[in-house]
Image: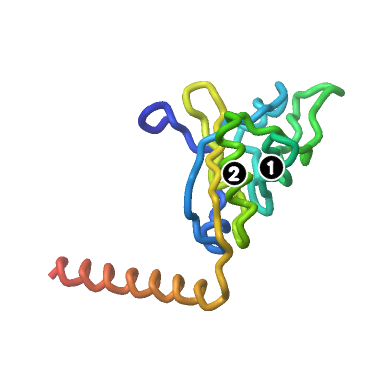
Amino acid sequence: MAKDGVKTIAQNKKAYHDYFVDDELEAGIELVGTEVKSVRLGRVNLKDSYISCKTGEAVLIGMHISPYEQGSIFNHEPMRPRRLLLHKKEINKLIGMTAQQGYTLIPLKLYFKGQYVKLSLGICRGKKNFDKRAAIADRDAKRNMDRALKERNMR
């Protein structure tokens, strides 16, 4: 378990590659019993999921939670839309941000905070291909510099 009772379950690494994250928000997520048990086992996939804000509520669409193996016939549907637990003011802020051109809501991380399952969602702008290439070049340059410093310190 990490510090402050926060244990990461799943991360959306592709989100940081495809988007610029301008702001982050923490939200609770409405789950049924067998979903919580599957999440505790780490059987979650955030890839290709997004958040829709319509009719005054935020809904997570496209997150896959595998069915619980010891579940009964009342097991959950893996790809069902899940409601996010946010205050009305936060939802209105998200609706205002997504109304602007180029912004979208992407789930970044799913984690336990104490006994509760929380979702970190990002207000993101899409990256162009040249932005992605620049990010890869920066990462490679940093890796080479770190490697050179390590070799120099070894001598």
Query: Could you tell me which quadrant the C terminus lies in?
Result: bottom left
The quarter of the picture where residue 93 lies is: top right
| Residue nearer the viewer, 106 or 140 | 106
Q: Secondary structure at mark 2?
A: helix
Category of crowding for the residue at label 2, using alpha-carbon neighbours closer than 10 angstroms: few (below 14), some (14–19), many (at least 20): many
Q: Amino acid at mark 2?
A: Leu
Tag count in the figure? Answer: 2
Q: Position of residue 89 (x, y in %)?
A: 56, 33
Residue at the image point whose x is 21% and y is 69% from the top = 149
Residue 149 vertical position relative to residue 113 in the rendered view, above or below: below
Residue drawn at the location 65% of the way across and 40% of the way down: 44
The reply to whether the C-beta atoms of the residues labelled 1 and 2 are less than 8 Å apart is yes
* Quadrant of the frame with the N terminus: top left
Q: Which residue is mark 1?
A: 53
Q: Position of residue 28 (x, y in %)?
A: 58, 30
Question: Relative to 112, is 78 on the left or the right?
Answer: right
Callout 1 amino acid? Cys
Out of 155 and 40, give the one closest to the viewer. 40
What residue did someone put label 2 on? 94
Which comes sooner in the sequence, label 1 or label 2? 1
Q: CA distance from mark 1 to mark 2?
A: 7 Å
Q: Residue at x 34, y 69 (%)?
A: 143
Residue 138: percent from left, percent from top: 38, 72
Along the line of sight, the residue nearer the viewer: 147 or 47? 47
